[in-house]
Image (cartoon, rainbow, N blue to C red):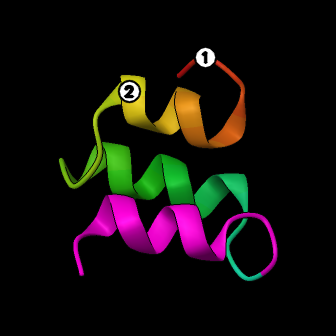
């Protein structure tokens, strides 16, 4: 599984917004993907 699939499955039940932000900072998710997952702009 890639980071995007894991984030879709785990947010918000197991992962919080800080985890999603960390994935964006690490280059594992794009800002657009993070916005789609959380509903907020990054």
Q: Residue at x 21, y 55 (%)?
A: 28
Examine the residues drawn in magenta and state their main secondary structure: helix
Residue at 58 percent of width and 73 percent of height: 9
Q: Quadrant of residue 23?
A: bottom left
Name the residue nearer the viewer: 16 or 12: 12
In which quarter of the view is residue 5 placed?
Answer: bottom left
Q: Residue furthest top?
A: 41
Is 36 drawn above or below residue 23 in the view shown? above
Q: What mark, if any, has residue 28 been given in the picture?
A: none
Disc 2/disc 1 C-alpha distance (Å): 7 Å
Residue 13 horizontal side relative to residue 18, left or right = right
In the image, is 25 to the left or to the right of 26? right
Residue 7 on image: x %, y %: 50, 65
> Which residue is more in the foreground, 28 or 10?
10
Q: Is residue 5 magenta?
A: yes
> Which portion, as a residue range, is magenta?
1-13
Badge 2 vs badge 1, beta-carbon distance below 8 Å? yes
- Residue 32 located left or right of residue 34: left
State the image coordinates of residue 40 (x, y, percent, origin top left): 70, 23
Left-right relation of 39 to 31: right
Extreme right residue here?
Answer: 13
Secondary element at tag 2: helix
The residue where tag 2 is placed is 31
Q: Residue at x 43, y 74 (%)?
A: 6
Using the image, determine if residue 6 lies above or below residue 11. below
Give the class, few, some or many, for how many residues have Cα within 10 Å of label 1's Cα (few <14, many ≥20): few
Q: Quadrant of the N terminus?
A: bottom left
According to the picture, the residue beneath numbered tag 1 turns out to be 41
Instruction: Provide the secondary structure element on which disc 1 rests.
Output: loop
């Amino acid at each position: 599984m890639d980071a995007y699939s894991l984030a879709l499955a785990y947010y918000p039940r197991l992962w919080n917004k800080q985890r999603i932000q960390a994935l964006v900072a690490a280059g594992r998710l794009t800002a657009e993907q993070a916005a789609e997952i959380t509903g907020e702009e990054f």
